[in-house]
Image (tube, rainbow, N blue to C red):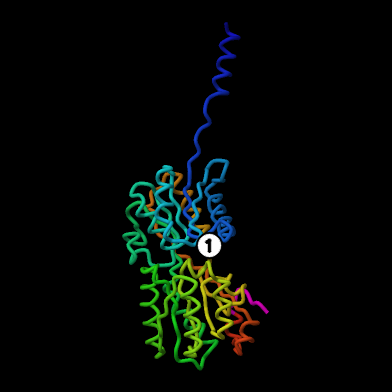
Amino acid sequence: MRFLAVCLLAALIRTAPAQDLPVIGYLGAESAERFAARLEAFRRGLAEMNYAEGRNVAIEYRWANGDNSRLPELAADLVRRQVSVLVAPGGAPAAFAAKKATATIPVVFGVGIDPVAAGLVQSMNRPGGNATGVTTANTEMASKRLQLLRELVPEATSFALLVNPANAKNAEGTIDNLQVAAHAQRLQLQIVRASNEQDLAVVFQNLARQRTGGLIIANDTFFVNRSEEIAALALRNRIAAIHQSPEFVAAGGLISYTASFDESQRLAGVYAGRVLRGEKPKDLPVIQVSKMLLFVNLKTARALGLTVPQSVLVRADGVIE
């Protein structure tokens, strides 16, 4: 009888379902391939909180592949999956889609705008509600990009700002910030808009015809996904352009300046881990990324007939010869 009881207990143990792991819903505005390096940074952040994918946490991924119109349904799908925390570290459209999809599941975002002004949180220190996260405040860096571009083309008095009208909140914030900076420096600023490939080609052709002094490209997933295309258009039309994406410089673009995306992703991973431990988003202050990265392509500068000042080169984190 005792032997039968032991066997029955062993059988029950073998057939008992494994304990379910907590699930992170990861809402990506881009593609898994393009986001691979940043995903590794996100996982490093999770590891700092002693979480490892497949060991004590599962991750459900949803990718919009650069199509922001897909984000609301992808976010809703993760909510239906009843994930433990919804992470949207790929910019403002993903953050808004996640926040709109749920008022109860914790949301950890990563954005390049002021999350208070945009209505994502009540304040930086006390977010309130179910959302918190990380901001790179890239809209505020538009004025810094203008300053860097002026150092490369000091004789220019007119510049253009490229925004995506489909990402209205981000576009408005960037325009407001850069108009103030341009006015303070007595520069003319033209606003140009593109939300598809045809728009991009027309914009660059027009800027070349107008002999615009330089182009600042706004922080936007659409432009990041097309870094190579934009770099080629800028070089073909002989336009000095500054982008947020280091991939732009690697593809032949002139210069990029932004907060570290890897650092933003790592911090989002840390916050996801803290939420899994039981902390509430309303009590976790929004983090401002302070690590900035500057990359310059000297080969492109020479092709455009520009001399990069030593003052820029000594500040660069990477230079392509």
- The vertical placement of 156 against 294, above or below, is below
- The vertical placement of 208 against 88, above or below, is below
SS class of the residue under badge 1? helix
Is residue 281 found left or right of 43 in the rendered image? Answer: left
Residue 77: percent from the left, percent from the top?
42, 47
- Residue at screen point 40% across, 89% down: 188
- Residue at screen point 56% across, 14% down: 8
- The vertical placement of 55 against 310, above or below, is above
**Which quadrant of the figure contains the C terminus?**
bottom right
Nearer the observer, 129 or 37: 37
Residue 289: percent from the left, percent from the top?
48, 65
Residue 243: percent from the left, percent from the top?
52, 75
- Residue at screen point 45% across, 86% down: 159
Q: Which residue is mark 1?
A: 263
Nearer the observer, 236 or 79: 236
Which residues fall within the magenta stretch? 315-321
Nearer the observer, 183 or 223: 223
- Give the amino acid type for the residue marked by disc 1 in the picture: Glu
